Image (cartoon, rainbow, N blue to C red):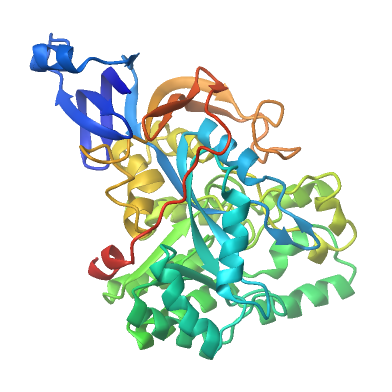
C-alpha cells in the first residue's frame, strides 16, 4: 500500500516545511518540499509518481504532519496496592493511539525471588496479540544479586536495554545503595541504562506513619509526607552513584524543583544525566489532593507539588535540563480501587491516567501557551524518547526509511477532556472539563491508518514488539 500525505506542514525536531510525504508499505519513501504555488510531490516527480501510484491520499492542508508520539513510561496491568492498573495492553494502547501516540515502552516486573526472564516473558504475553500500537519494555528489578546481575546481559541482548530501580517503596521495590551501584556497574559492561525512581522511601515512611498516627489520613497527606527534599536528596544520591560507576543514569517522573536542581548541577559538571517529567507535574498541583477523599484521584508518586514547582519544570524543558515528557500512566478507578485507601492515604493505589492526554496537553500548555516551539514539542513527545531509549531513527522522526508512524495534527482544533469521552478504561479524568487546543485527526502506525475522524479503525493485536538498541546515544551525548 502506498499513501500520499499532501499539503501539510511537516514538523520535526529539526524544523518545519511545507512538504508532501509518500509512504510505501511500512516506511517513509519520500519527502518532497512543496514549492510556493505548486501542488508538491505530484509536480516535482510527475510521471514517476503516477507510475508509483497512491492507494490512499490524505489531504493535510492547514495541519501539521508530525512523527507519532512515543510514551516511554506506561504501566498497563501493573499489580499495585492489592489491585491492578485498570488499562490492559488493548485498552491502554488504543487510548494512546487516540491521543497521537504510536509507540509505548512499558515496564515488565521481576517478581521477588523469580528471574528477570520470567518477568519479561509474563509481560510479553500480556501485550502480544492485544496491543494495537508498537511497544517495548523496560525491566523492573526487584532483586539485585549475582544471578540477576548476570541475567541483565541476556535481557539487553533481547532488546530490553533498560532497568528500573527504586530508592522508594521499602518492602516492595527498594534497593540499597550498594545494590544500585552493582546494577550500574553491570550496565557499564552491557551497554544498558539504569532508570531510577528517586525518593527517599524510608524517610517518607517515617513521616507518613507519623501523620497517620496523628489522625491525618486524607489523601493530601500523601503529598505532605513525601517532601520535595526527599526527592532532591535521592536524585543527587543516585547521580553520585552513577558517577562512581562511570555510567549514565535516567531519572523517571521528576516532579520537584529540588530534584531538578540536582539534575542541573550534575549536567553542569558534565555528567551524563537524563530526566523526564510528566503532565501531572506541569498541570496539576498539591491543591488537587486537598478536596477531601476526592483527592485520591490525584494520588501518585512522586506526589503533586505546590504550584511554584510547575514553572521550574517548564523552564527545565525549555533549557533541556529535562529531556522529555512521559506519562507514568497507571490508572485506577476511583470507585472500588482508589477507595481502598479511604481512611488511610497510605493504602490508596498510586497512579493516574494520562496516556491519551499527553500530546494535546503539551501542545495546549506548551505551544499554544507560548512556552515552547512546535519543534521542541515534537522533540519532547517523540524524538528525545526515541533517541534516549534506543528507537531512533526507526521511530521519532519523519525521514526516508523510518517507520511510517505519522500523525496529522490540527493545532487549532479545540476539544474538552472528559471521562465521558476518553478511551482510557478508568472512571475519571484528572483534567475533567479542561478545554485544550490541538488534536490528532489521523494517526498512522507503520503505514496503516488506525485512527481517523475520531474513530479507531485498526485491528486488535496489530502492535509489534520493538527491540530497542543499547544506550549508545545516551553515552555519546
Residue at left 58%, top 87%?
176
Can the viewer see residue 335 in this picture? yes
Say above or below: 458 vs 109: above
* Relative image position of residue 147 (x, y in whole percent): 54, 86
**Which image quarter is the C terminus in?**
bottom left
Say above or below: 200 vs 139: below
Residue at left 33%, top 66%?
470
Q: Is 30 on the left or on the right of 165, as rendered?
A: left
Residue at left 90%, top 68%?
215
* Relative image position of residue 116 (x, y in whole percent): 56, 73
Can the viewer see residue 247 in this picture? no
Residue at left 49%, top 41%?
463
Of 157 and 400, the residue lying toward us: 157
Q: Is 65 on the left or on the right of 170, as rendered?
A: left
* Relative image position of residue 1 (x, y in whole percent): 33, 23
Of 87 and 464, the residue lying toward us: 464
* Relative image position of residue 247 (x, y in whole percent): 34, 79
Of 223 and 308, the residue lying toward us: 223
Say above or below: 315 vs 133: below
- Which of the 4 image quarters holds residue 31? top left
Q: Is 438 on the left or on the right of 299, as rendered?
A: left
Amino acid at each position: 500500500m502506498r499513501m500520499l500525505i499532501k499539503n501539510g506542514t511537516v514538523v520535526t525536531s529539526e524544523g518545519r516545511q511545507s512538504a508532501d510525504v509518500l509512504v510505501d508499505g511500512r516506511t517513509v519513501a519520500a519527502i518532497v518540499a512543496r514549492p510556493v504555488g505548486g501542488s508538491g510531490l505530484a509536480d516535482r516527480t510527475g510521471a514517476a509518481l503516477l507510475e508509483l501510484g497512491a492507494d490512499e491520499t490524505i489531504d493535510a492542508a492547514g495541519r501539521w504532519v508530525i512523527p507519532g508520539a512515543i510514551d516511554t513510561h506506561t504501566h498497563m496491568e501493573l499489580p499495585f496496592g492489592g489491585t491492578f492498573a485498570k488499562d490492559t495492553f488493548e485498552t491502554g494502547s488504543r487510548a494512546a493511539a487516540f491521543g497521537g501516540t504510536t509507540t509505548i515502552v512499558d515496564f515488565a516486573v521481576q517478581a521477588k525471588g523469580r528471574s528477570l526472564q520470567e518477568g519479561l516473558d509474563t509481560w510479553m504475553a500480556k501485550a502480544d496479540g492485544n496491543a494495537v500500537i508498537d511497544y517495548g519494555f523496560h525491566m523492573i528489578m526487584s532483586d539485585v544479586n549475582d544471578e540477576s546481575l548476570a541475567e541483565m546481559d541476556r535481557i539487553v541482548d533481547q532488546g530490553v536495554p533498560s532497568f528500573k530501580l527504586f530508592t522508594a517503596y521499602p518492602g516492595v521495590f527498594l534497593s540499597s545503595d550498594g545494590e544500585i551501584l552493582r546494577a550500574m556497574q553491570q550496565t557499564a559492561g552491557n551497554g544498558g541504562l539504569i532508570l531510577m525512581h528517586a525518593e527517599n522511601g524510608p524517610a517518607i515512611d517515617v513521616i507518613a506513619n507519623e501523620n497517620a498516627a496523628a489522625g491525618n489520613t486524607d489523601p493530601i497527606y500523601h503529598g505532605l509526607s513525601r517532601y520535595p527534599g526527599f526527592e532532591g536528596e535521592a536524585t543527587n544520591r543516585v547521580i553520585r552513584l552513577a558517577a562512581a560507576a562511570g555510567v549514565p543514569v535516567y531519572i523517571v517522573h521528576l516532579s520537584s524543583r529540588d530534584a531538578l536542581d540536582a539534575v542541573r548541577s550534575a549536567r553542569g559538571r558534565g555528567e551524563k544525566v537524563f530526566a523526564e517529567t510528566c503532565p501531572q507535574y506541569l498541570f496539576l498541583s498539591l491543591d488537587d489532593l486537598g478536596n477531601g477523599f476526592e483527592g485520591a484521584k490525584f494520588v501518585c508518586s512522586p506526589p503533586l507539588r505546590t504550584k511554584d514547582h510547575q514553572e521550574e519544570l517548564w523552564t527545565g524543558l525549555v533549557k533541556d535540563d529535562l529531556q522529555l515528557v512521559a506519562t507514568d500512566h497507571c490508572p485506577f478507578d476511583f470507585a472500588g480501587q482508589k477507595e481502598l485507601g479511604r481512611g488511610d492515604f497510605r493504602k490508596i493505589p498510586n497512579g493516574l491516567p494520562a496516556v491519551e492526554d499527553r500530546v494535546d496537553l503539551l501542545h495546549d500548555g506548551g505551544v499554544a501557551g507560548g512556552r515552547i516551539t512546535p519543534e521542541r514539542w515534537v522533540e519532547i513527545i517523540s524524538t528525545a524518547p526515541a533517541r534516549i531509549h534506543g528507537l531512533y531513527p526507526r521511530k521519532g522522526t519523519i525521514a526516508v526509511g523510518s517507520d511510517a508512524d505519522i500523525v496529522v495534527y490540527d493545532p487549532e482544533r479545540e476539544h474538552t477532556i472528559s471521562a465521558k469521552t476518553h478511551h482510557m478504561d478508568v472512571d475519571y479524568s484528572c483534567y475533567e472539563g479542561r478545554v485544550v487546543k490541538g488534536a490528532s485527526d489521523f494517526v498512522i502506525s507503520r503505514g496503516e491508518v488506525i485512527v481517523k475522524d475520531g474513530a479507531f479503525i485498526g485491528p486488535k493485536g496489530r502492535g509489534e514488539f520493538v527491540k530497542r538498541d543499547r544506550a549508545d546515544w545516551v553515552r555519546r551525548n
